[in-house]
Amino acid sequence: MADPAATAKADDIVVCDACPVLCRIRAGKTGACDRYGNVDGKLTRLDSMLVAEQVVARGGAMVPFREGDWSGNLLHGTTAFVTGIGAGTTYPDYKPAPFIIASQHRDIDTVTVVTEGIFSYCGLKLKIDTDRFVGPEQAAVRAEGEQVGHVTTAEYGSQMLALGGVRHLTGGSKKEGVVTCDTLLTLCNKGAVELAVDGGATMTVQAGQAPIINGVREERMRVGCGSATIGIFARQWHGHVDEVIVVDDHITGVLSEHQAGRFLGLSPAGVRVRGKKSTPGRYFQVANPGLGWGCTDIKDPLAIIEKIDPKTARPGLRLLMVSTTGEDAAYFILDEALRPVPAEMPPPVAKVVERIGENCEPALTSVLFMAGAGGSLRAGVTENPIRLTHSIKQSLVRVTSGGAPVYVWPGGGITYMVDVLLMPDNAFGYVPTPAIVGPIEFTMRLTDYQALGGHMDHVRQLADVLEEPRIKRTGWRDANPWPLEP
Ligand code: SF4
């Protein structure tokens, strides 16, 4: 089918105007992004257009509603949602969006404006659920030697990377832009990429998979910081050990000094750890970040013991040292000279160490795509773009990406984030400007669409759109809310 985007035609060449590259495409060939081609002298969006359909009850069985005369509508509402995946673009949106689709849901007339946005202002936030040291905050993150982002503020139990963004896409060398675009696209489409951090780790990351850091696949996200671990398990250790030190790069916890230990009536054990005391039983900077215990650079846990006070400590004192994932643990008993001597861990103590591991969640990588849809893309929706922005902020318009729910940031513009794992596979593309192409849909009541200055003369019925030959159907992801639901 010919794309609704206008094409200039000379001889057998069509000019694609779906992005600023303006490819001149010969018959039978594709443009630079492989998304558009010259098919029989017509500019054609080559990929299928994805329609996600709900599974509905029919004759007592839950079946996809695919067969027969399918309008996409059932008695109680629409079961088909046309996503922006493969919809095409109308950049720079001096024309209405490729599809403006009317349907009925629960007796309400609705409209969904469907397009593929071209995002120069976009990037990824990677949340990597491990405390393993990946590199210092602000350090450059590289792919193929090019900087594609940086290490940003760590979150509780997770390392965070900020990748992409307009500076790396368009503000550096051509190679930096190309590699950044490629890295974003692979991660958006749920593929794996190799990254290297200046002064830090090399890693392989992929949405929904455990990160591989310096060649080792991470298994556990820590149960909490050292102090939290003390708080959670203090009661279970009580009576089985005299002191527990939970080694952690952030806050190392010391049971007998900690509020939890005091609450249980523990006596001070006289084992003093290195680092900066924050509050009782909580120590910062006991070691440097690294690949050892509790994501410090410590291989021997005794190295963080500054001294054992003979006035307080006593021979026979039972000491457990453990990391925040329970992956490293050692048990000691003080001898007559108050030296910690390794000893076999009693079963009740080992059980709590195991329980730390049991309480750790798997180390996963989450990839959130973040982009600004507040530019010309809005003109494809309405002739008065600020009204779209306001309507979204007023919750009159629901924004989705490939049918997945998005989070729209407060304040100005339409800056949104979406978890790529909630989207269909291969939902993203690119153009060589370079920029990422991503699906976006705006759903609202028909009356609201009219009120915000929508392109009413371009509204098409869902049943009509579903006749398009490029349609490809897929099942709706049940975990995602139905976009037409009020
Ligand atoms: S890069 Fe793709 S979208 Fe841009 S003009 Fe070329 S074919 Fe069209």
Image (cartoon, rainbow, N blue to C red):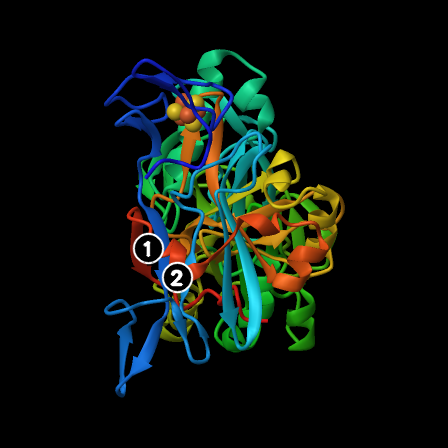
Give whichever of 393, 183 is nearer the camera.
Answer: 393
- The residue wearing badge 1 is 467
Q: Which residue is mark 2?
A: 463
Query: Alpha-carbon neighbours of circle 1 within 10 Å: few (<14), some, or many (≥20)?
Result: few
Q: Quadrant of ligand 1?
A: top left
Instruction: Check the image and report above or below for 409 versus 144.
Output: below
Q: Decide: marks 1, 2 in contact (CB < 8 A)?
A: yes
Q: Residues within 10 Å of mark 2 (few under 14, many from 20)?
A: some
Query: Residue 223: percent from the left, percent from the top?
Result: 50, 61
Determine the secondary structure under disc 2: helix
The disc labelled 1 sits on which kind of residue? Glu
- Visible in this render: residue 196? no
Q: CA distance from mark 1 to mark 2?
A: 7 Å
Camera-nearest residue between 398 and 45: 45
Picture layout, residue 39 above or below residue 279:
above
Q: Secondary structure at mark 1?
A: loop
